Image: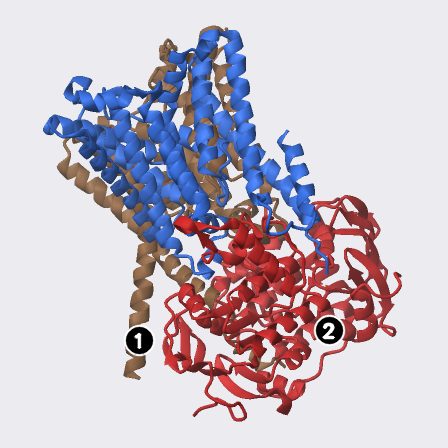
Amino acid sequence: MNPGAPGADGAPLLALDGVTKSFGAVAALRGVHLALHSGEAHALVGENGAGKSTLVKILAGAHAPDSGRMTLDGRLLELRGPADARAAGIAVIYQEPTLFPDLSVAENIFMGRQPLRGLRRIDTRAMNRDAEQLFQRLGVRIDPSRPARGLSIADQQLVEIAKALSFDARVLIMDEPTAALSGVEVERLFGVARSLCERGAAVLFISHRFDEVFDLCQRITVLRDGAWVSSDSAADLTVDEVVRRMVGRDVSSLYPKQDAPLRDTLLEVRGLSQAGVFSDVSFSVRGGEIVALAGLVGAGRSEVARAVFGVDRYDAGEVRVAGRALPPGSPRKAIAAGMALVPEDRRQQGLVMELSVERNVTLARRRALSRLGMLLGAAERAEARRWTRRLQVKTSRLAAPVATLSGGNQQKVVLAKWLATEPRILIIDEPTRGIDVGTKAEVHRLLSELAGEGLAILMISSELPEVLGMADRVLVMHEGRVVRELPRAEADETSVMFAATGQGATA
Amino acid sequence: MAHDSLYAAPPSGADTEREAGRLAGLRTAVGSWDAAIVAALVVAVLLASLLVQNFASGRNVQFLLLDLVPLALPALPMTLIVITGEIDLSVASMVGLCSTLMGQMWLSTGLSLELICVLVVVIGAALGAVNGVFITGFGLPSLAVTIGTLALYRGLSFVVLGDQAVADFPASWTAAAVQNLPGTSIPAAVVPVLLLALVFGVVLHATPAGRALYAMGNNDEAATFAGVSVARTKFWLFVVSGAVCGLVGIFWTLRYASARGDNATGLELTVVTAVLLGGVSIFGGRGGLLGVVAGVLLLGVLRNALQLADVDANALTIVTGTLLIASVVLPNAVADVRARLHRRRQRAHATAA
Amino acid sequence: MSLTDTGASERVADHPPPGPGRQRRGLTERLLAVRELSLLIALGALILVTTVRNDRFLSAQSIKDLLLGCAILVILAVGQTLVIVTRNVDLSVGSILGLVAFAAGELFLAAPGTPWPVALLLGVALGALCGAVNGGLIAVAKVPALVITLGTLYAFRGVDYYWAAGRQINAADMPRAFLRLGNQTVLGVPVLFLVALFVVAAVGFYLRSYRSGRELYAIGSEPAAARLSGIPVGRRVFAVFVANGALAGLAGVLYAARFGTLDAAAGSGLELQVVAAAVVGGVAIFGGSGSAYGAALGAVLLTTIGSSLAVLRIDPFWQQAVVGALILAAIGLDRLLALRMAARLRGRSAHGA
């Protein structure tokens, strides 16, 4: 079968045919097809774990496929490493910037391809000048001679884009490049991608944001569970159809929050400031209430959560739990006061991968579970069993290392760990990040249930439908400040985005 | 009510999957590591008793155990430190400095030896606290800091006594250090070592603090989020390491009836080797005290047997160095081979199917 | 003083970059220059203070001794820079030096007619071989270089002791032309120092101006990113250990030529001074930054401190303590500067959008 291209003209520039890749016993890709045509932007969509990142790594030469063929210009392409991919004209912008903090911005762009002068020496002046020109093309101003250390995430992403641009790449692959960019920057990036297309390059764009996918791309390929589902012209598709193909069935709409009686104020934050990160943040959350903290990535929302919980210190302000001041800088005291924080980066901040499910679930409860200073296995096991059952974590045994669980189940272990502390206040950062579309509703139901039990929930979310569906009140942050507070009735996409991008009056 | 997509969730991030596979391989390799070390210990003891003259004599057992004391003691806190992902290379220099300070105090102050011993342990703790402040207070890598204090403390111990030695400790004390338990050829000094080993073992394996050590060794960020005071815990570990080195300094001085600037030079290598040989991962987060005790014994038996077989003491460092390298290279090589075999099996399976 | 310097340079950098016509050093490079400048100032101040106390410190003879004294350390520090820049460390250099020095002596004993350039080449080759052992083991084990080279530090030294078996090689056993190499001067400058200068210039130039040299910084700065940008990380790190071994071999031959009398202990403990020199010279222990020039200056500063102590009639036993204190001070200072720098750079990251 050749899913190649009904509608696309001519032979593909870069084609993958029946590519498989397994890691140990797990098949990440199963016979995937992909055809990128010159002058075309192609979107690759799929749920988390559908195999998109593995595909990118194969195209980038970082992984070798187990079987299947890759062709460039109709000729067989074998990549033995990232260097080969570069030589073939394939440029990749990864999800996470991959810069060298100690080297200058220009060196970051031209590493391994620095312009040379006599004796094969590096021509620093030419290199800085070339970098300058790239930034001019992107319409940004970054000093090429400064070290990459300390660049904001958006600037780092721009350096990555300049790097990809500097290749004069024939194939540009962008793995969720827009997560950290503002609207203006996204538009500029798309401008660059389009001009590359006009010059005959092929673009592969991976994103969860469907508006961007439909804005930029002419064709859309859907992956599910490592297998190819479809490749069609974007004009023939709708968002609903794409989602249906990603999930493989119809999706129930988002679970709206049930009304719960509001109780006393449990969390109160007054004038919280951290120099250069956020300033004068004040809000309160009552029992039974879900308050959403909305805003763009980098607005300082996660930082506020970290400071409230005591992971980071703050310079001014105070945090009160049920009327009592919480001493700053101690997660232990925050936990003791009944606070729980489900962090944004679950793998890095929420789990200890090599420890067992049981140890992970009881990690935050280890003191409470010990008797006379000794931690005995039975109590731990009982506690772990109780919570993994309630959240339906699927694992062969509690002693299995968390690393062996699937992504969705790892997420549940993090939730189980924090719910096991029986908190009064739950701060949850991006509750459905990295969760399948199907499971999202389940998490939302759980949050609603917890609010019904009287918990005060502070939810940080970048997904507007989630914010609008779940929150009783929405606080919008922009550049480190809370700029708007919107009750449920007044919150809609326009009002929230308006405030989040810094337009409109400050509340 | 559950959506089946949740349970059939496909692999997220293939990289991590491979890592997980590798870790699992490593884990089985390490799980059998304890057994392998104990087996190697038994074989070494048997071979040495058969092949090396005088190895099995009571007098040699006494010497062997006495030699083990200064190796076993610092290995206890070192195990905990390495499990948290740090390292303390300054242990030998702390022993040396504590030893010369003990000698200097005995020589030039009128203090009683009892008081001096207490002071030496306190000083050891203070030396460890300096390490701790640099590592946890300033956020510097323990490797670099303790290389610095390795040089600093050794230098200071030469400053204290120069190339002189203090030897005139009361005979009752020096005799007590090497005295056997009545009716046996087992030195009495072994008893406190065993007690301390028990304490460290219980702390590591059966208390909330021990859990926290493993958690922070694997992922200190996740540990912080779970309410573990990572910096404070590490600080105290380095203090304990210093205090234990104070004890070793006292033992070393009394056993050899000599306080010298170069006492215990190079001991850090043996201690680190014993800990890694005992199955503790240099990356932190994995290993146990039982394995380390076996590692200490194995190392001690090997060195003792080779010395009896007339191998030059300096050339013995080949053995220690090689063991250190082998103990970090082998687990990885084993995991690699396993992974390769697994892949081959799978491929064979695929072609068969 | 260095802080105000960086402040000024930042303000300049805030202005729009100048046109391509003007030559201008980038901010990244200037930060390094600041470190080298402050080292020079420290060195100048030290020489000034010592000379004021004792004017013989600046006599021709004493300057010659100083240059001779620092040459070997400079070569080793430059080699170590290559390694540390890639976020590794090589603790075995002292042992490689000792082994090669002894091997050179043995060579002249066995074949008295050997011309010295042959000995030099063989010594460099033996050093490179030792480096290849380090590099190979690190590639296989995928564990921190520190552990492997701590192992080989003792293994190589053990081999040295085993080979020497207590013997000593004397100047009388070596050809006069070879020994002259160690003490000869050209226009009052010792040949040894000229060799060291050549090594500094070559490595410094390579690190700054060649693609593969810059890749070493990239590897140390962010290994994962280096892999993704197609840099052959494993091969480069291996090559760096071989190069460092070769330089240690060169230093070993020069050591034999300079001192004439050799036993198995030659160069013991030198690794600490080497690491200290590099770190004091601004080579960040976390990898990714530093220069060969800085490391060489660090080595000169360290040697000068040693001779100043003697001239100022301070107990020579302080030398090692000073080395340790300098390591601690240097990494502490680096950390402080890095934090300040990061804070400043963050503030400037906004760009015209």
- Residue at 36%, 35% in the rendered image: C199
Residue C25 occupies quadrant: top right
Chain painted in red in the figure: A
Q: Position of residue B326 (x, y in %)?
A: 29, 46
Q: Colour of chain B?
A: brown
Residues at marks 2 and 1, CA–CA distance in whole angstroms = 44 Å
Q: Nearer the viewer, residue C239 or B215?
A: C239
Image quadrant for the C terminus of chain A? bottom right
The reply to whether residue B194 is visible in this rendering is no
Looking at the rendered structure, the kind of residue marked 2 is Glu
| Residue drawn at the location 75% of the way across and 64% of the way down | A295
Q: Are marks 2 and 1 in contact (CB under 8 Å)?
A: no
Chain letter, colour blue in render: C
Rate crowding at label 1 as few (under 14), some (14 to 19) or many (20 or more) other CA atoms within 10 Å: few
Which residue is at 46% across, 34% downward?
A: C293
The type of residue carrying mark 1 is Arg
Q: Chain of mark 2?
A: A
Q: x, y percentage for residue A301?
A: 73, 59
Examine the rendered structure and indicate whether residue C263 appears above or below residue A418.
above
Write down the residue under mark 1.
B347
Q: Is residue B259 left or right of residue C9?
A: left
